[in-house]
Structures are given as C-alpha cells and as structure tokens.
Amino acid sequence: MYTVKSMNNFDDNMARKETLNLVEVIKFLKDYKLFFLTNSNEVQNLIRDINIKLINKRETQELDFVGFENFLVQFSATSFTKSHTINTKTAKGIENVRRNLSHMCHGQLL
C-alpha cells in the first residue's frame, strides 16, 4: 500500500496497519451503503480537514482511530444536515440504511 510515510522499522509498520486510507474509508461507506450521501471529493476533504484542523496532523490521506471517530461524527453531521435531491436511487438507499439500522439497534427509528 502506498503511503507518504517512510517505513524504517517494525513500529512504523505497525502504525501503518492501524490507519485507514482514503480508499478504505470509501470502501467502508460503500459496504454500509452510505456512499450515496456523499462523493469521493467530499470524503477526501473531510479526512484532510479532520487531520489538519482537529487532530493537528500533517497527514491528509489517512485516519487513525481517533481520526476515524471524528470522521464518523463529522460525516453524519454534514451528510444528514444538507439537503439531498430525492430520486428513486436515493430513496432506495435511504430505505436500505433504515433497514440496516433497525437490525443493528432495538430503538425506534423515526
């Protein structure tokens, strides 16, 4: 996997294994059927902003665990507060998300 960091020893390699890069984050969103809410440019900008503004890291393409937690919060806030054009594909995606969430939690979804 390509990274801008140099891997000099086993500790550096272990640190690399504990991060998610942009492609892995997009795959995560697609696996959980959430990618229809965004696009790859927005995800890339969000990762960069989290690393630079919230965590004060210079890395712009990868997230560690703390960065991933912040990504989930920021992605939820930005995705579900902006208006979306509802078409049949989007409506189907929203219904899939509701169905998946209802299987994961026992609380009532609105």
Image (spheres, rainbow, N blue to C red):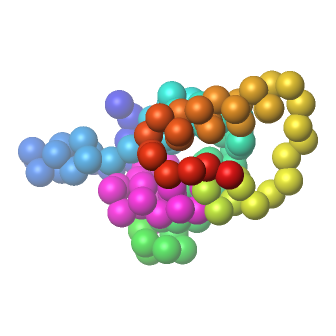
Instruction: Point out residue 30 in the picture as x, y percentages from the top left corner.
Output: 57, 30
Instruction: Point out residue 104 in the picture as x, y percentages from the top left corner.
Output: 44, 40
* Residue 85, placed above or below residue 67: above
Does residue 45 show up magenta in the picture? Answer: no
Apparent side of residue 68 relative to residue 49 in the rendered image (left or right): left
Is residue 105 or residue 42 the one in the foreground?
Answer: 105
Apparent side of residue 64 relative to residue 94 in the rendered image (left or right): left
Q: Is residue 26 visible?
A: no
Q: Quadrant of residue 34?
A: top right
Q: Tell me which residue sits at (69%, 59%) in the image.
A: 78
**Magenta-drawn segment:** 58-75
Q: Main secondary structure of the magenta part?
A: helix
* Residue 93, placed above or below residue 19: above
Does residue 72 show up magenta in the picture? Answer: yes
Q: Quadrant of the N terminus?
A: top left
Apparent side of residue 94 relative to residue 91 in the rendered image (left or right): left
Instruction: Point out residue 43 in the picture as x, y percentages from the top left corner.
Output: 62, 48
* Residue 106, placed above or below residue 69: above
Instruction: Point out residue 94 in the picture as x, y percentages from the top left corner.
Output: 71, 36
Q: Tell me which residue sits at (88%, 37%) in the image.
A: 86
Q: Is residue 4 visible?
A: yes
Is residue 67 or residue 15 the one in the foreground?
Answer: 67
